[in-house]
Structure formats: structure tokens, C-alpha cells
Amino acid sequence: MKWEELLEKVADEPVFRTGFLAASGETLPALRLQLSRWVKSGKLVQLTRGLYTLAEPYAKVSPHPFVLANAMKRASYVSLQSALGHFGMIPEYVPAVTSVTTGRPEWIETPLGLFIFRHIKKSWLRGYKQIDLGSGQKAFVGTPEKALLDLAYLTAGADDPDFLAELRLQNMERLNMDVLDQLARTSGSPKLRRTVRLLRRLFDQEAGEML
């Protein structure tokens, strides 16, 4: 495959897999060798085995980190502080992209950033939706309610007022307390029920301050 042929196929794709190019007629070993050469020459960025994105200035669209995270792990969605930061629920900048997955936990360092995957059980793979990130890109991201409970679920001591205070939650009017209650009940986790009770107090306190 020639470089011009690759550009024609993937210029509009934020990320692509080797299998996407397999229909070109070349054998997989030859295709992988050519892709490896383009990575070494700086034309491509390899994220994980078989997963690539075009390097600047060849890409027509800059890949959103959430799109890359979704592509790295199937059965995953962006959550915890990354989702909370995206929805304006916490003030801090979050440099790494954290997702939850039913697969094995993993830290993946790439030229485009750090991607963290935390393991959850299959029954807890819920409470997320596909959101529009602009430039025609979409990704699966936990709702604000689920991102908060994922954080509590995966963090020791998260059902403590001091922990929630350290988060410095903001824009709490974006939370649906009924959704939080339902998620906590269906989880069967006493820890999450305690967390929701604390969040409700914070929610009521912020609502009172706005009056």
C-alpha cells in the first residue's frame, strides 16, 4: 500500500485498525510492516497493537482523547474524574483519561497521552451514553451520576464526607438524585448507598445556598 492510498482511506478517521485496511489486497504481514515503517518515519502514531491514528499534519481531524480511549478497549466507557471534568462537575484539569471496562485493568502510555482502564463487573456496565464531541466524533461516556458512583465504587474511603469535600463538586444541579438512588439500589452496594446519602446532603446544601 502506498501512503497516498492510506490517506485516501483513513484521512477522515480519527483512529483506525489494521483490519480496516485488510481489504486492500495486501497480506497482513506486509501491511503491518508498512505501517511500522510509517510509525518510525513519524507519519503514523501507534496507540496499541493494531490501532493507529494519523500524525500531524496528515490528519484532517484531531482525535479526541475519549474516542481513542473507547477504541483501545471494547466494552468500556470514559468515567470517574475524566467524565466529571468533561461535565464541569469538578474544577481540576484531568490529564489522564480514565475509563471503566469489564476487561483487565491497564495503564496505557501513548504519544497522545495516558489512558487508564479500571475493571468493573459486567452487571455494573451501565449508566453511560454516547455523546457528541464535535468534528463528527462521538464516544461512550458515563453520565455524571454514574461517573460519581464509579469513582466511589473503585476508591477506598469514598463514602466519607472528607473525600467528597476534597472533590470540590460543582454544578451539582446537573445531578439527578433519583438516578443516583436507583443506581445505588441496583448495585446492591451498602457503600454506594452511603455515598448517595452524603451526595444528597451536599445537593440540598448547594440548592439552599442558591435560594
Image (tube, grey):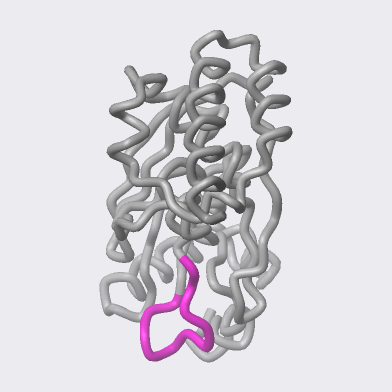
Task: Please give left or right for residue 6 compared with residue 109 in the image.
Answer: right
Query: Where is residue 25 drawn, in percent x and y?
Result: 67, 69
In the depicted view, which residue is nearer to us: 108 or 210?
Answer: 210
Instruction: Name the residue: 27% across, 79% down.
Output: 41
Query: Where is residue 145 drawn, in percent x and y?
Result: 60, 39
Residue 80 position (above or below residue 42): above
Task: Please give left or right for residue 80 compared with residue 127 in the image.
Answer: left
Q: Quadrant of residue 125?
A: top right
Q: Quadrant of residue 130?
A: bottom right
- The boundaries of the magenta stretch are 54-64
The answer to whether residue 50 of the structure is visible from this angle is no
In the depicted view, which residue is nearer to us: 97 or 24?
Answer: 97
The answer to whether residue 150 of the structure is visible from this angle is yes
Residue 150 position (above or below residue 70): above
In the depicted view, which residue is nearer to us: 111 or 90?
Answer: 90
The single residue placed furthest to the front in the displayed view is 211
Query: Where is residue 195 drawn, in percent x and y?
Result: 49, 22
Q: Quadrant of the C terminus?
A: bottom right
Instruction: Name the residue: 56% across, 65% down.
Output: 16
Instruction: Name the residue: 54% across, 86% down.
Output: 7
Task: Please give left or right for residue 153 compared with residue 145 in the image.
Answer: left
